[in-house]
Image (tube, helix red, strand yellow):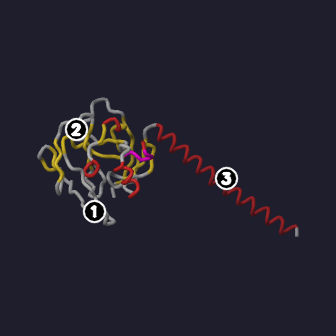
Amino acid sequence: MKMRHRHKVLRRMKRLVWFYRISSVSLVTLGLIVLLGGQGFRVNLTPSEPLGLWRIVKPDRPIVVGDLVFICPPNTDAMREARARGYLRFGLCAGHLAPLIKTVVATSGQAIEIADDVRVDGRPLPHSHVARVDGQGREMVPYEGGVVPPGAVFLHSEFPGSFDSRYFGPSPMEGILGLAREVWTYAP
């Protein structure tokens, strides 16, 4: 009887040791995430840009065409629909959306035309084919085109399946968190 009791106690102790180890690793990991997030670090898990660790850097100049930025998507019906479809991840931006990493391809006053691809001021934008359906066969509604309004930017990613301004239109510049800088990334 004493042996059986001792085995039960040892098993409980082993479980407690494993529980404490897992809890400790989880707390340390959570602490690192909070610490790094507070320093502007973000992990990108989407194929729009290389996977890995990025940093948000406050620009010391105005945002211009060609800048790769982190931007909070506007809290709109289109973004809520995109989240419901799985195009956007959960995050700390308005509407509980994660920031996007996109390249600014047009700024205020530039003309956007949408057909089979995107044209900025009449010039075709490379790698900008406009999909009519998503990967699951659901209809994609493209942006109708127009002039980028003051205080807004038109965003793009060369990844063919990217959800960018081709579909949701210009985004307010006030949502820009900063420039996106690679820290440690992997491009599959």
80 inside magenta stretch: no
**Which residue has dot 2 on it?**
107
The percent coordinates of residue 183 (x first, y second) are: 38, 44
Position of 20 compared to 81: left or right? right
Residue farthest to the top?
Answer: 60
Q: From the top left corner, tell me how far across and down residue 63 is, in percent.
A: 27, 35
Tags 2 and 1 touching, CB below 8 Å: no
Q: Which amino acid type is marked by label 2?
A: Thr
Tell me the number on the disc at residue 133: 1
Q: Crowding near pointer 2: few (<14 within 10 Å), some, many (20+)?
A: many
Q: Which is more N-terminal, label 1 or label 2?
A: 2
Q: Earlier in the sequence, mark 2 or mark 3?
A: 3
- The span picked out in magenta is 95-99
**Residue 103 location (% of width, % of height):** 27, 45
* Secondary structure of the residue carrying numbered label 3: helix
- 176 sits to left or right of 110: right
Q: Relative to 61, does residue 185 appear above or below in the rendering?
A: below
Amino acid bearing label 1: Val
Residue on which the image places disc 3: 20
Which numbered disc flags the more N-terminal residue, 1 or 3?
3
- CA distance separating discs 1 and 3: 48 Å
Q: Residues within 10 Å of mark 3 (few under 14, many from 20)?
A: few
